[in-house]
Each structure stands twice: as structure tokens, then as C-alpha cells.
Amino acid sequence: MVKATKAEKKIAYDTKLCQLIDEYTQILVVAADNVGSTQLQNIRKGLRGDSVVLMGKNTMMKRSVRIHSENSGNTAILNLLPLLQGNVGLIFTKGDLKEVSEEVAKYKVGAPARVGLVAPIDVVVQPGNTGLDPSQTSFFQVLNIPTKINKGTVEIITPVELIKQGDKVGSSEAALLAKLGIRPFSYGLVVQSVYDNGSVFSPEVLDLTEDQLVEKFASGISMVTSLALAVSYPTLAAAPHMFINAYKNALAIAVATNYTFPQAEKVKEFLKDPSKFVVAAAAVSADAGGGSAQAGAAAKVEEKKEESDEEDYEGGFGLFDEE
């Protein structure tokens, strides 16, 4: 079998990348630091079906994206270029972005602390028996870790923060963790950015629920409304409030003067006869109370009517009137 040349490999890679760009509209940009080939192969198997993982040199990917954009007129794909920084790869997918992101996160594997590696998390050595013989106490002394000898083995007395996040792992720390059999770090593909039909956003957006989206949207509408009302600029969100405020102003003028308009007549009637407020409130309460409340109100009205009739009957004859 003839081995492909570098030029042929580049052409094949360019063809594959352009084909994937045409076929998929969703892309996850993932960081691949400290990810081994076996681990990457397992990720490919886990995503097989609706997703394709493509790794490559940034210069090759950028060149292919630019040329493909010029040839196809797809300018939206150029938004990928600023994201191709560092050791990154692309996951083209037709599935749900959140589900694919969660599937990628499952394939993290433990890794030892190697010398010179920048710690992604804090490393804390917990107290307990290490199983090491007393001749190994020099490692603990160098790192100022309090220990004691218990039944012929070294025991750590208190928890010790051995490495802080962002610090480089030293030779002593790496040697001690190796002796203790601790693999403090875990590595895998990490989603850095999400490309969806030309839009680029942070992967944290995938964790938002529908309720959170509605809340944020409502908050944005509220801010737009407040700003529009403050500067008297009409917007769709502020229009109802502006109409109500205008009606209130016109109503106030009608009440204070002889000027009137149909919508103000009822208000003026209520102001002239405040008892109508009580009647209106009773009607609203009856409607809110349902059929039973209405029946009760009707019974009270009927009872009052009967009392009134009796009074009229008794008052219709004098004490000495003849029948």
C-alpha cells in the first residue's frame, strides 16, 4: 500500500473539513490538553451516530475555513476563526448540544501530577495512614507535612494543601503523590465555545433552563420599558404604560374641569355619588364568590323586599279605622 504524501493528506483533510461544514450547522470547540489517543478514540465511539470529532493543526483549520468561506459564500463560518487558539478540536453534531456536551464530559480519566504541569485544581492530601515505611519521612519533611509513626508506617496527622490551582507541580510534590498512589487530576475534552448557525456563545448557556430564559427575557423587557418611559421614547413594551398614563392625565383634567369625554363620564358619576362605589364593590365580590354568593345576595334582597312589603301593609290602616 502506497503511503500518502503530506500534500495528499492536507488535501484530504481540507476536503473532509469543508464537507463537515456544509453538512453540520452546530459545532463544539473543545480543548484537548493532556488527552491521549486512546481516550480520544473512546470519545469518538461514544459520539458515533450524530457527531464527528475532528482534530488538526490550527493553521490548517483556519486556512480551510477561509477558503471554504470564499468559495461557498458562507461568511458566518468565519466566526470560528477567533476560537481556533491553542490545542483545540471541533465536534460537528446534529444532536442536542447540551446532551452532546454532557456525553463528552463523561470521558474524563484520572492522571498523575507530572513535574512542571499547571494544576487545574487544588490538591489536598487527607490525613491517614500512608502505608509507607519510616524511611520515607524525608518526602514529608521537605513539604512540611506533619506526620507520625504508627505501627511501623508513616501516618499524616492533618490535611495539607499540597498544590494550589494554577501553580506548577514541583518534583517533590509529584514524587510524593506518586508514592501515595494519588492521581489528583482528570483530563478530557473540555467545551470552550459553541457555534450554532453562525452564532457563537459560551457553553454555560447550555445549562440554562426554560424558566431561567423566561426570567432573563422578562428582566430585559422590564429594563427596556423603564428606559423608554424615562426618556419618553415609544416602544412596543412601553406603549401600554404610555397610553394608561395619558388616559390618567386626561381623566384628571376632566375631573378638575367641566371638560368631559365618554370614558370620563362613569368616573364623574362615581365621584358625584360615592355610594355607587359600594354597589360596584359588592357586585365584584358577588362575581368573585360564585353562584353561592350570588344566591345569598339575591336571598338578602328578597328578604328586604318582604320586610318592606310588611311595613307598607301594617302602615296602611289606622288603629281605629273600620274594616
Image: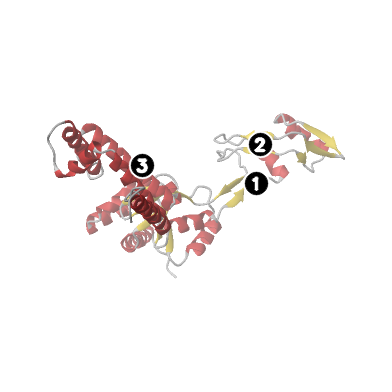
- Disc 3 and disc 2: Cα gap in Å? 49 Å
Measured from the top left, where is residue 180 in percent x and y? 72, 43
Measured from the top left, where is residue 141 in percent x and y? 74, 30
Q: Is residue 83 left or right of residue 160?
A: left
Pointer 3 local density, CA inside 10 Å: few below 14, some 14–19, many at least 20: few
Q: Secondary structure at mark 1?
A: loop
Disc ID at residue 219: 3
**Where is 118 relative to 199, above or below?**
above
**Where is 322 relative to 116, above or below?**
below
Measured from the top left, where is residue 218 in percent x and y? 35, 45
- Mark 3: amino acid: Ser
Q: Secondary structure at mark 3?
A: helix
Could you tell which of marks 3 and 2 lies nearer the N-terminus? 2
Q: Disc 2 vs disc 1: which is toward the camera?
A: 1
Quarter of the image holding residue 231? top left
Q: What is the number of callouts on the image? A: 3
Read off the residue under disc 2.
173
Q: Residue furthest left?
A: 259
Residue 200 visible in the current orientation: no
Q: Residue furthest right?
A: 151
Q: Is residue 181 left or right of residue 244?
A: right
Quarter of the image holding residue 14? bottom left
Disc ID at residue 183: 1
The quadrant the C terminus occupies is bottom left
Measured from the top left, where is residue 197 in percent x and y? 31, 55
